[in-house]
Amino acid sequence: MLDLIAPFFERLYDTTGLNFSPFYNSYDWGRLVEGMWVSVKLITAIIAVSLVIGVIGAGAQTSRLRIIRWMVSAYIEIFRNTPPIVQLLFFYFGLGAITPQVDMGGWYEPAIGSFGWAVIAIGIFGGSYNVEIFRSGIEAVPASTKEAAESLGFSGFKIFVYVTFPLALRICLPALTNNIVSLAKTSSLAYVIAVPEITYSLSGIWSDSVNVPEMMLLLFGYYIVLIAIIARIMTMIERKIALPGYGQ
Amino acid sequence: MTPNWTVSRLTWRAPVLAAGLCVLATLAAMAQDGSTGRPSALATLITWMPFILKGFGLNLVMSVLAMALATVSGVILGFMQISPVTLIRLPAKLVTNLFRNSPWLVILFAIMFLVPFQITLPGGDKVMVPDWLKATFGFSLPVMANVSEILRGAVASIPSGQWESAESLAFTRGQTLRHIILPQCIRRMLPPWMNWYALLTLMTPMAAILGVNEALGNTQAAMEAAGSRPEFLIPFYLFLMTIFFVVIYPISICTRRLEKRFATGS
């Protein structure tokens, strides 16, 4: 792969001075590929964590216990109204300092590394938005549908799993797409705790080869393609699970 | 669809939440206070509080300036997006989508590295551009794109019957926009606009990565100056979260209130 494109980019550098070093230097190429791979892993993990938190939170929001409802709304308010970067630093440095160390056979490593903390912190941050999104979807399911399910003998939990949630998911999918896209962008914050994702590895390349504009171009291109892919996948899911005659 | 449990008034919840964060910070500080003789983490935090708050002032200045810049340029961009001339509309769409789909951090890096640190005025004088000003400019770009999109969305949400009836009354396009469409758009644009201000303020601590001395940068500097003991980390970061919360929470409550009022009003 690299052998094919390397001559072109080397000539580009010689003739125009545009230094796309990852495309002819195998070391930089490795850093770019590694960065893209870590970034994709990070985004997938963050989205998964935030979705799980969103579903659990929205379920807890319907609880009969006042204290649980209050705790969920306090969680939402705190995480939505404080800077995500400070949350990330708080989790990584603050809580990371008091988590247990694991014996790696001679040296000690924290049980949760920077990648893990990035997933936890940004996932919790994104989850606070997802709770609201799922809740608005659940509220939009007509009460008559739930009553019909009840009259067919479904228990409360089964109504949620088989009736309310599938309908709510379809209702809140557009809002969910927005939040997932914004989470994918927020994942670049992991740079501050040195997770080797794309922003971090490209910043390593541009400080070695002093080719900031070219690497910036690459970075913008990467995110635009990534977000186009995510948006495409979400529209596909939306179309796939659409119920004829339900919703818009 | 209006959520019935969402808080839309400043009730006892806000102070309780803020106080809860503070108590948490205090507890964390006291729990980790091991040895005697050194000043406790809490005492250190109180000593450095004015320094952090001074940094927070810069955060607020940056957010207000960036928002003003973003509003003006975003409104211009939004008008370009709804222009009937393709040659104006397409570049505006491109710029909007570029900045809407890129992470804040990437835009911030781009501005910090690609804008020269000093510019030559037409008179020949060289002026240094301070870092915080560049960061402000960097923060305003994504918000600009989103303000532009808010304007486009608001104009598109006005029923087309209004355009047609204005046309039948012999209004020109400019007159229709000025007297009929925009007055209705402003009330629809206000809540999302305020939302973006809150989000912008929450993003300003990112400037610390690039060496701007705002709240986060000052907090880290304060921790270092006080001896960078691990027990500082939790109380200092919690304090930082609390001051942001105290400023942003009223704004987001106000936004929700407006949203609710406009939703029932229209």
Image (cartoon, rainbow, N blue to C red):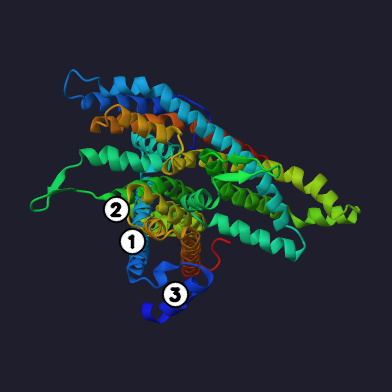
| SS type, badge 1 | helix
Residue under disc 1 on the same chain as residue under disc 2: yes
Q: Nearer the viewer, residue A109 or A182?
A: A109
Q: CA distance from mark 3 to mark 1?
A: 27 Å
Chain of the residue under the numbered disc 2 shown in the image: A
Chain of the residue under the numbered disc 3 shown in the image: A
Residue, disc 1: A38
Relative to B118, residue A247 above or below: below
Residue, disc 3: A10
Residue, disc 2: A115
Q: CA distance from mark 3 to mark 2?
A: 34 Å
Q: Nearer the viewer, residue B185 or A99?
A: A99
Check disc 3 and give the amino acid type. Glu
Give the quadrant of residue A38.
Answer: bottom left
Q: Quadrant of the N terminus of chain A?
A: bottom left
Check disc 1 and give the amino acid type. Val
Q: Is residue B31 left or right of residue A16?
A: left
At a point 67% along the width and 58% down the height, the residue shown is B92
Chain of the residue under the numbered disc 1 shown in the image: A
Q: Earlier in the sequence, mark 3 or mark 1?
A: 3
Residues tagged 1 and 2 counted as in contact (Cβ below 8 A): yes
User: Residue A167: x and y, percent?
Assistant: 46, 58
Check disc 2 and give the amino acid type. Phe
